[in-house]
Amino acid sequence: MINSPSNPTGIVLSAGEIEDLVRAVEGKAYIISDEIYHGLVYEGREHSILEYTDRCFVLNGFSKLYAMTGWRLGYVICPPGFVRAVQKIQQNILICANSFVQWAGIAAIKETALYVREMVETYNRRRIFLLGRLKAMGFGIEVDPTGAFYILANARRFTTDTYRFCLDVLEAARVAITPGIDFGSGGEGYVRFSYANSLANIGEGTERLERFLDEREE
């Protein structure tokens, strides 16, 4: 299973990386590709697994690119032989999307290209600002994220327990960040930042975080 652009890292898999993966599993397994953040890319472009193989399941929806979070409108692209099995699962989980959300999805596809472009440009300004602030504070970011709206930063300079660290930041600075361990044991030592908020709020949040870190070092 792959997720590109990725949550929590914001990393976008290159064409070469996807091709290598397809070759590695060819004839052995199917690939599930979570492409919910497609369209939210700030450098280069994202690639769908469908460009390289049809032995795959593509998951996508309207919550991210069209800002329809909570409206629960999505879709699966799968090999023909799996369609009936997927239908059985779907029918027992949610029956169908309600009518007004379906109409909203049609409107999103047909009428929002300009607004989506503006939203992506806004996200990019936030991304650049937050990257600069986090690096200045001493968080480790080896590869700048170029997709989604997340930054996964190395926080080992500040803590050996990122879960506790995030709780302390929340309680003392009133800033919500996510411990990397929430995404698996390999995430320990990292914290995830989201820039799905206004530039003003991100600026205020980073100022509070910086004061918190300065006070810890005193």
Image (spheres, helix red, strand yellow):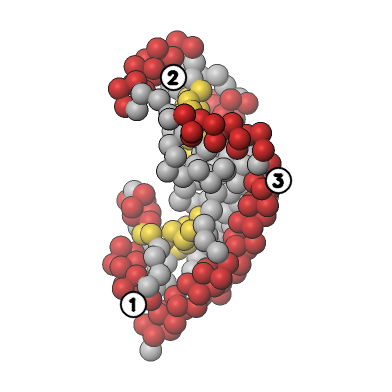
Q: Earlier in the sequence, mark 3 or mark 2?
A: 2
Position of 167 with respect to 40 (left or right) is left
**Compared with residue 116, is residue 22 higher up or lower down, i.e. above or below?**
above
As helix, strand or loop, the secondary structure at mark 3 comes to helix
Residue at which label 2 appears = 28
Amino acid under disc 1: Ala
Position of 174 with respect to 112 (left or right) is left
The residue drawn where x is 45% and y is 10% is 81
The alpha-carbon separation of the residues under discs 3 and 1 comes to: 40 Å
As helix, strand or loop, the secondary structure at mark 1 comes to helix
Quarter-wise, where is residue 85 in the image? top left
As helix, strand or loop, the secondary structure at mark 2 comes to loop
Residue 16's disc is none
The residue drawn where x is 50% and y is 65% is 140
Quarter-wise, where is residue 114 in the image? top right
Percent from the top left, x then y, of residue 63?
50, 42
Residue at which label 3 appears = 114
Residue at which label 1 appears = 172
Q: Confirm or deny contact between disc 3 and disc 1 (CB under 8 A).
A: no
Amino acid under disc 3: Leu
**Compared with residue 172, is residue 83 higher up or lower down, i.e. above or below?**
above
* Quadrant including the N terminus: top left
Position of 97 with respect to 200 (left or right) is left
Question: Between tags 2 and 1, which lies in front?
Answer: 1
The residue drawn where x is 38% and y is 89% is 218
Percent from the top left, x then y, of residue 205?
47, 72
Amino acid under disc 2: Lys
